[in-house]
């Protein structure tokens, strides 16, 4: 597994890097060598540590964000969260791995662009054709409330979103 550590206003010691590598080796049993893990570390004003863990497996993202008194505690909580995501979607993921039919996933861009009156955060992502069901799976894996994708059947850009009462909505363009 390839591990990238991004520290924002935090110094990453060799001991901390070794800890991350040792702990994340646990996921090698689930994923192959092409897996990428990105750890983003931030220290908050109240001395809490914020850790974001994103694992990219053939375009499918598993993401967890935790805040704790230490980075080790935050990493343990994030890993537990990702393990739950893996168990929840294990059957579907194994089916797609066998078929090599993974869909595109959102990739966060950490930079933000500003305009005169609004603070706009820009995200870029690759779009690959998928069904609405696959888009909902990706949305749930990322723990987002909506997901933009190219509809496999129509070739148009669509959006799936979570509704109240554990239901989902699909927005399709008319033209």
Image (cartoon, rainbow, N blue to C red):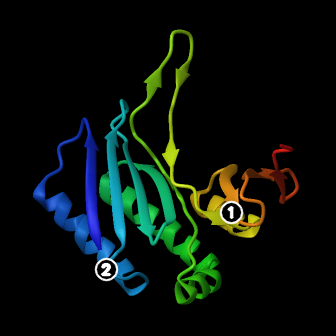
Residue extending farthest left: 14
Q: Residue at x 66, y 55 (%)?
A: 149
**Vertical relation: 34 (above or below) 41:** below
Q: Residue at x 26, y 44 (%)?
A: 7
Q: Is residue 48 left or right of residue 97?
A: left
**Vertical relation: 104 (above or below) 112:** below
**Secondary element at image label 1:** helix
Distance, label 2 to label 1, CA atoms, is 25 Å
Q: Is residue 153 left or right of residue 82?
A: right
Q: Nearer the viewer, residue 157 or 114?
A: 157
Q: Is residue 158 left or right of residue 53?
A: right
Residue 175: x and y, percent? 83, 43
Residue extending farthest top: 116
Nearest to N terminus: mark 2 or mark 1: 2
Residue 163: x and y, percent? 83, 51
Q: Residue at x 42, y 65 (%)?
A: 55
**Secondary element at image label 2:** loop
Q: Residue at x 49, y 58 (%)?
A: 64
User: Mark 2 packing: few (<14 Cα in 10 Å), some, or many (20+)?
Assistant: few
- Tell me, for residue 135, which label it has, or none: 1
Residue 99: x and y, percent? 57, 87
Specify the quadrant of the image occupied by residue 74: bottom left
Residue 80: x and y, percent? 48, 69
| Residue that badge 2 annotates | 33
Specify the quadrant of the image occupied by residue 31: bottom left
User: Mark 1 packing: few (<14 Cα in 10 Å), some, or many (20+)?
Assistant: many
- Tell me, for residue 19, which label it has, or none: none
How many numbered marks, from 0 up? 2
Q: Nearer the viewer, residue 122 or 89?
A: 122
């Amino acid at each position: 597994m390839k591990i990238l550590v991004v520290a924002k206003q935090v110094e990453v010691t060799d001991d901390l890097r070794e800890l991350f590598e040792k702990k994340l080796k646990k996921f090698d049993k689930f994923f192959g060598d092409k897996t990428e893990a990105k750890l983003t570390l931030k220290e908050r004003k109240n001395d809490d540590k914020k850790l974001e863990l994103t694992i990219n497996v053939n375009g499918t993202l598993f993401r967890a964000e935790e805040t704790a008194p230490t980075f080790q505690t935050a990493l343990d909580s994030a890993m537990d969260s990702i393990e739950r995501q893996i168990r929840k979607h294990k059957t579907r993921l194994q089916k797609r791995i066998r078929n090599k039919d993974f869909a595109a996933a959102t990739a966060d861009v950490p930079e933000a662009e500003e305009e005169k009156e609004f603070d706009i955060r820009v995200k870029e992502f690759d779009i690959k054709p998928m069904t609405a069901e696959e888009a909902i799976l990706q949305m749930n894996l990322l723990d987002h409330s909506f997901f933009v994708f190219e509809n496999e059947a129509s070739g148009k850009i669509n959006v799936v979103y979570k509704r109240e009462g554990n239901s989902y909505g699909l927005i399709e363009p008319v033209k």
